[in-house]
Amino acid sequence: MGRKLLAALMAFTILFSLCPTALADSQEPRQTAFFTSQPHTDLDYSEMTYRRPDAKAVLAEMEGLRGLLDGVENAKAVQELFGVLVNRYMEAQTMAALAELEACRNAAGSQAAQELEAAYNACAAIADALPPLMRDILNSPCGDFLKEQLGALTAAYYMQYTEAPARQRELTSQETSLMNEYRRLSAEPCVVEYFGRDWDMQALNQAFYQEGSINADTYAEIYGMIAQELNETLGSLYLRTVRLRKNIASAYGYSDYGEFAYRRLYRRDYSPADIASFREDVKTYIAPLNTALHAIPRQKSDVFYSDYSGEIALDLIAPYIGQMSSELLEAFTYMREHHLYDTAESADKTDTGFTTMLYYYGAPFLFNAPAHELFDFTSTVHEFGHYNHAYWSPSGWLNAVKSQDVMEVHSQGLELLLSHYYPDIFGKDGQAVADYQITSLVEAICQGAYYDELQQYVYSAKNVTLQQINEKARLLSIDYGFAEEDSPMAHVYGLSWVQVSHNFTQPFYYISYGVSAAGAFAFWLEAQKNYFNAVDNYLAYTALDASYDFQESFAATGMTSPLTDGYLEKLAQTLRQELKVEQRLEELENATVFTDVSADSWYAPYVLALAEMGCVDGDENGAFHPGDNAAWDMAMGALLAINGQKPELEDSRTITRLEFCQMIVEVLGIPAAQGSSPFTDTDDSSVAALAELGVISGYDGGAFHPDGELTRAELCAVLYKTAEAVSLIDQPETEDTEEFEMDENAA
């Protein structure tokens, strides 16, 4: 009890890793009653004014209280003054949280960072002074009221309390300074030059995922350059942080920082040694599943790279929260009505998402920095899972905080359960988004184990170097299936671990994402049988009080702990069955990227090759329409793309066979034909040039039909074979390498 209360006293920020709402028309909230109402302020966030905590004044008031402890006649005055001091402490926690929010909004600003450090140090000074004051009160004639408030067990703990040495406080202050330095460095833009163009991560992702203007190898090369730059910038700071944290662990009597973090920081009911078998099961069962899920291509859709910042994601979520639970709706409505969230786009924000508690006001606050993709939507849902828990949890000074692992189940469980409504939220893309959500949490299990094993290595090694960390990260990326041996992505993984903020700000936290994601899937599996039973089980789990540790929480709700032997093996098997993974992979082998392009069609190798290079695409339903007439803009766009240029033409006129041949010869600069045209109905030099290259051979009887309309399939075949002939691309891997003949019936 004392350990948990002390954690509550010291934890003033809950970090994890968002106008009134309206239900869908005529949809009443689904009434639930799992939580107990808590007091919350009526103030808007804009009315919550930051004031730097005055630690000196509070400490002076504490000393004044000590002067009253000798006389039992002062008991009432002591009780009243202690209540004031506790309120001062809660206010200091809140001011530190407000300072952190401002620092995260203005990550590059030195003033915001300095204010955060000052607020944190002031709050820490008050927090350090409060337990010894409680000890002195309990051991005085005036201590009966506090014994009654604490209970016998907790009172006994604080009656024996010993202050933290000055060395511990100094090291903690140094850690805060390093984290402020990290926030500043990580907020600075990282731009690299590649063939005359400046690239950052946003431009790189847009070019690869949205525009398709670069291939996977180019993406990996540029990503590697960015990762190298960040690795060099942040790596030395990370090594300094590791050395400091080893000293912190030693100052608290721990020989290993991992053990210190597991036990003292995160209150886990398992040790680093215990989690080793979990990590091995992840490698054996979950990592192959993750690889298989990523092998199933997701359909091309703007839904994955749309804007979800600000109110957008919240507006999408709003109609469905109440359909799940009236209590979820109450928390959601309070958050929006009082503007207790910041999910807006800003170049100045630090790259993170978290939920913090403003204890003085009884108000949670949700923060997220948009990443310009669907992740922003799922992050909003994730953080609202934390927000809902914080809204319903007691926030008084005597209330302990829950295990971090338990709280991650709150967020990830909500992510999985809300996916039930994705067909309504995202329409035709609903299933694709649900697949993305599930795949993301399967990957979270792997990433949790990956980063935990990397950090176990870093903090246990003596005098570890940045090069050694990079190599270990590379090898682990192969072990966990993120990359293949000697692949460019393995090199990238060996560098890009510095891009994960938790490695700096919350070491050893990431395993929480892994074990909690594994546990959260229990609700999803139940939802496949009875959705609202699963929702109610989730709400009951979220409503558990803070006395339950991670493994205890599953037992309390009749579920199996994800750390139980055999759990991950069974989970992987069940997910494979529910998601029909093997069936979908088999279908993939026999299918193409387009719904109307069969693998055995004559034009499939050319269409699919050009599609993979981003030169052609299908419609919103995944169809290519190979027999339709090709338009001028499609022809020029594909031709420019394969030649490494950006198409800008908009012309929907049908292009003829002759016009396409002339376009190819002109754009690619193909030399004129040496001989005359082999066709009976045209002597055009462009047609003759392509005939000499072996790209076209016309129809039976020697005709070319120059004014005939060109189909989309024919366009792909002619363009691909031309590009191959002039060495723009490599020889395609197809069984049929016979010369292509324009055939009126081919399409």
Image: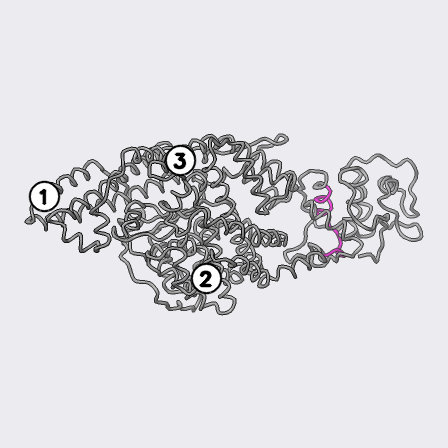
Image quadrant in which you'd find residue 625 = bottom right
What amino acid type should be assigned to the residue bearing mark 1? Answer: Leu
**Which residue, given by chain and number where applicable, does mark 2 sit on?**
560
* Secondary structure of the residue carrying numbered label 2: loop
Q: Give the magenta-colored segment's residue range.
A: 625-639
Residue 247 lies, in percent from the top left, at 37, 34
Residue 81 lies, in percent from the top left, at 14, 46
Residue 18 visible within the image: no
**Which residue, given by chain and number where applicable, does mark 3 sit on?**
246
Locate the C terminus by quadrant: bottom right
What amino acid type should be assigned to the residue bearing mark 3? Answer: Lys
Residue 446 lies, in percent from the top left, at 53, 49
Q: Nearer the viewer, residue 291 or 437?
A: 291
Mark 3 / mark 2, whichever is N-terminal: 3
At label 3, counting other C-alpha atoms closer than 10 Å, the crowd grade (few under 14, some 14-19, many 20 or more) is some
Residue 77 visible within the image: yes
At label 1, counting other C-alpha atoms closer than 10 Å, the crowd grade (few under 14, some 14-19, many 20 or more) is some
**Which residue, given by chain and number where applicable, does mark 1 sit on?**
68
Residue at the image position 35 percent from the left and 32 percent from the top:
174
- The alpha-carbon separation of the residues under discs 1 and 3 comes to 41 Å
